[in-house]
Image (cartoon, rainbow, N blue to C red):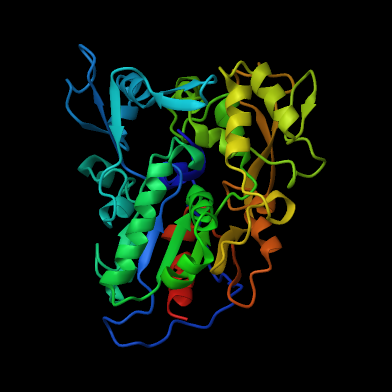
């Protein structure tokens, strides 16, 4: 599974930050009476931040033809069970039609659209609760909003999606998201909506806003808050595609996880981009050569690593999800007051080095660079090119991880400051 929220699920990146100085661009939250707020909220989650259900209709298939939770069910990741997870979440890509689909006989669905349940938990089970409440995702943010006067499923809403698919393959979702924004606006006294996104959700929300008319945005959307968005990709997904990523769980074999990681469109969407290269440009090196972040080298390393249809899927996803007109290859400014929030000052695995190692089946060594522990700073900070002032700004959170930007007090305080500015 894609690694943008691995630390959310399993607590692999948990930093205790003391005395953090926040680079604020808005004042403290206003003192409105309890129960009053300025902007209802629609939350767009990150990669693997949406609960997903599956049904296997094949004879002898897991679940006996009934719907079951495929993501996240921590029990399905146990060694004796993980093959049932992999076999039911796999996708196949047809390069002739540029379409991804479930394997034959398997159906999937993303439940709880429009509710806070969809943003609060990705595994609501007691098992996850007793394992450090590892299934909680946006619950801390939702609780803080409710305490401040918001109402679940009325003034704070969740917009989950099939995180395996890139934006261009998820058109039905964006129709539902538009309807949800309009509904949230009308049921809250025609108050314009604040869209909050986390991680991959930032690419989703920006795509959505870039595909609406300015007149529609002016009527329905007041604010966009992007949290920890990998604007220029992340090396973690390159690792997942090449050698597999085990979520930081010792009993999950990376090569087992790699099988399904190699078929998700979003993993190809999130590969590092050449317009924001790492120091010295090389992102991955083997005994044979170094690879940089150009499309040509990304196709070459995917082919060299034996990723099925990797070069074709990468190029399709990269081309189909471009929105021209933005600075340095970024999408255009979202067209509403935009606040780009992310952590800095956390050592982040960035450069993959396979020299002297069995490429691609052995885990590499890493060179670290600045970031939030998951995404490098050069990717997180690319939104600076939008020149967000005067309606929005950049908010950098020193020492705050990718997870804590959404779940921790420092990140949530800043979100509240923006919402109640």
Residue at horizontal 64%, vertical 69%?
388
Give the residue furthest to the top. Answer: 59
Judge left or right: residue 128 versus residue 334: left
Residue lying furthest right: 280
Q: Is residue 81 above or below residue 70?
A: above
Return the x and y of residue 393 as percentages of the image width and height: 61, 71
Quarter-of-image position of residue 366: top right
Q: Is residue 19 above or below residue 77?
A: below
Q: Say left or right for 379 vs 261.
A: right
The residue nearer to you, when weighing 401 against 137, is 137
User: Could you tell me how many numbered marks the image carries?
Assistant: 0
Q: Quadrant of residue 249?
A: top left
Residue nearest the observer in this picture, 394 or 204: 204
Q: Is residue 320 above or below residue 82?
A: below
Q: Is residue 240 visible?
A: yes
Which sits in the foreground, 337 or 414? Answer: 337
- At horizontal 17% and vertical 27% (from top left) the residue drawn is 66
Residue shown at 30% from the left, 88% from the top? 33
Q: Give how far across and how far down residue 258 sits, in percent.
A: 50, 23
Q: Quadrant of the N terminus?
A: top left
**Which of the 4 image quadrants contains residue 392?**
bottom right
Task: Tell me, yes or no, if residue 141 can be seen here.
Answer: no
x then y, percent, for residue 94 = 49, 20
Q: Does 248 appear above or below 313? A: below
Residue 329 x, y percent position in the rendering = 70, 49
């Amino acid at each position: 599974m894609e690694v943008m929220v691995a630390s959310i699920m399993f607590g692999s990146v948990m930093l205790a930050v003391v005395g953090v100085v926040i680079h604020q661009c808005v004042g403290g939250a206003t003192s409105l009476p309890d129960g009053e707020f300025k902007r209802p909220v629609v939350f767009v989650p990150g990669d693997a931040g949406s609960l997903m259900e599956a049904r296997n209709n094949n004879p002898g298939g897991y679940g006996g033809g009934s719907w079951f939770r495929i993501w996240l069910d921590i029990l399905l990741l146990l060694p004796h069970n993980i093959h049932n997870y992999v076999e039911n979440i796999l996708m196949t890509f047809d390069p002739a039609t540029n379409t991804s689909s479930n394997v034959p006989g398997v159906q999937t669905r993303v439940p709880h659209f429009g509710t806070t349940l969809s943003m609060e938990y990705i595994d609501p089970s007691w098992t996850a609760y007793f394992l450090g409440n590892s299934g909680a995702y946006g619950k801390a943010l939702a609780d803080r909003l409710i305490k401040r006067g918001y109402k679940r499923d009325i003034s704070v809403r969740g917009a989950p999606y099939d995180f395996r698919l890139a934006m261009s393959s998820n058109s039905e979702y964006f129709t539902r998201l538009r309807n949800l924004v309009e509904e949230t606006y009308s049921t809250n006294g025609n108050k314009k909506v604040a869209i909050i996104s986390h991680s991959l959700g930032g690419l989703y929300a920006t795509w959505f806003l870039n595909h609406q008319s300015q007149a529609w945005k002016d009527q329905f959307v007041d604010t966009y808050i992007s949290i920890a968005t990998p604007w220029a990709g992340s090396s973690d997904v390159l690792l997942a595609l090449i050698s597999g990523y085990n979520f930081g769980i010792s009993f999950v074999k990376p090569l087992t996880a790699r099988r399904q990681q190699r078929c998700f469109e979003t993993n190809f969407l999130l590969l590092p981009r050449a317009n924001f290269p790492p120091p010295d440009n090389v992102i991955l090196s083997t005994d044979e050569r170094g690879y940089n972040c150009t499309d040509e080298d990304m196709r070459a390393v995917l082919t060299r690593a034996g990723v099925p249809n990797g070069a074709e899927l990468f190029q399709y996803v990269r081309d189909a999800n471009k929105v021209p007109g933005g600075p340095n290859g970024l999408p255009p400014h979202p067209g509403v007051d935009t606040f780009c929030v992310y952590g800095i000052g956390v050592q982040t695995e960035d450069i993959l080095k396979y020299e002297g190692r069995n490429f691609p089946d052995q885990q590499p060594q890493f060179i670290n660079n600045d970031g939030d522990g998951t995404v490098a700073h050069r990717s997180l900070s690319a939104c600076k090119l939008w020149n967000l002032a005067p309606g929005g700004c950049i908010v950098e959170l020193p020492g705050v991880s990718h997870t804590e930007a959404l779940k921790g007090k420092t990140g949530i305080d800043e979100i509240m400051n923006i919402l109640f500015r």
